[in-house]
Amino acid sequence: MTDLEIRLVRPGDGDALRRIAYVTGYMGDSPAFYWRHEKSFADIWIGTYLDHFPETLWVAAEGGRPVGYLTGCLQ
């Protein structure tokens, strides 16, 4: 088992974080039963933070690979 690292988002984390957003985006489960387009769903929930407010996006990583995230709005 590797140590869990908590850090700010880094370049290159986006694809993994978008995937996590999609597979957990419906109360911890995938929204695939009602929203099949993964990229658009993930962009709604995490895209703005990745693209415009990375200072508000914290990543949980194991072995350098994102396994979770926490984000929020500053205003």
Image (tube, rainbow, N blue to C red):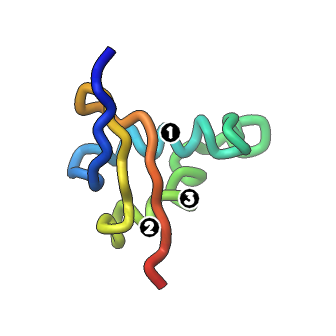
Which residue is tagged 2? 48
In the rendered view, does 16 fall on the left or right side of 44? left
Q: Position of residue 53 (x, y in %)?
A: 35, 71
* 3D distance between C-alphas at marks 2 and 1: 15 Å
Question: In the picture, which quadrant includes the N terminus?
Answer: top left
**22 in relation to 3, above or below:** below
User: What is the secondary structure assignment of the residue under circle 3?
Assistant: helix
User: In the image, what residue type sits under mark 2?
Assistant: Thr
Give me the residue at 72% from left, 44% from top.
27
**Do the residues bearing badges 2 and 1 touch, measured as CB atoms within 8 Å?**
no
Q: Furthest residue to the bottom?
A: 75
Which residue is tagged 1? 20
Give me the residue at 44% from left, 79% from top.
74
The first of marks 3 and 1 along the sequence is 1
The foreground one among 40 and 8 is 8
User: In the image, what residue type sits under mark 1?
Assistant: Ile
Give me the residue at 24% from left, 44% from top.
12
Give me the residue at 44% from left, 48% from top.
69
**Do the residues bearing badges 3 and 1 touch, measured as CB atoms within 8 Å?**
no
Q: Position of residue 11 (x, y in %)?
A: 21, 51
